[in-house]
Image: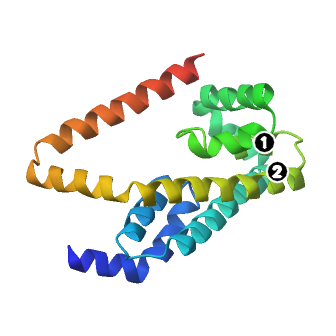
Amino acid sequence: MEEILGNLTTYGYIILFFYSLGGGFFALAAAGVLSSMGKMDLATSIVVASLANFLGDQALLLFTRANKHQMIGYLKKHRRKLAYAHLLMKKYGTWVIFLQKYIYGVKTLVPIAIGLTRYDAVKFALYNFLAAILWGVVIGVVSYLGGKTILSMLQNAKDNPWIFPFVAVALIATIGFFISRATKK
């Protein structure tokens, strides 16, 4: 365990950066917990994750704009989620850029959906930058403050290893249920 923590301390920010290009929720939460243990710096973790999250969404938008025809063909099997992203954009406007950071399964589709429209790229960049900073601060600080609780839960899971699979399956099933329910509407 100490070797893993040593590697995370050494390579943690690099891992956090690359993982946050595509979302990074769990990596930032882990960095917040490690920060509460004194293994990483919280401010640096927030800056790295926010910057990578911003760059990842910008890259998706620009890639989609440059390759609209190829992306439309690729997204045929994700039509329902893409339609959901468009509905969110119509209903909430620019707030969807902030909301999408927290909705698993929609996070990557919103920049793609915006890339398929004529939404102003500079306006998206500004909102995306602010949303990435807010996302980084919220997730980083909450996980830092909840780090002690999370560590005690992990210790309980270590003492009772049979509980973890049940909790993991229940959590995944609950998240899947709410995502499928939201996209069916």
Q: Secondary structure at mark 1?
A: helix
Task: Give the quadrant of residue 158.
Answer: bottom left
Q: Residue 104: x and y, percent?
A: 52, 40
The percent position of residue 2, horizontal first and vertical second, equals 22, 78
Amino acid type for the residue under numbered disc 1? Ile
Kindly identify the residue that appears in the image at 63 percent across and 63 percent down: 50
Q: Is residue 108 visible?
A: no
Which residue is nearer to you in this view: 176 or 92? 92
Front in this rendered view, residue 63 or 179? 179
Residue 15 locus on image (x, y percent): 46, 71
Disc 1: CA contacts within 10 A as few (<14), some (14-19) or many (>=20): many
Callout 2–callout 1 Cβ contact below 8 Å: yes
Give the left or right position of residue 160, taking residue 71 as reference: left
Number of numbered discs visible in the structure rendering: 2
Name the residue that disc number 2 marks: 124
**Residue 16 shows which numbered tag?**
none
Sooner in the amino-acid sequence: mark 2 or mark 1: 1
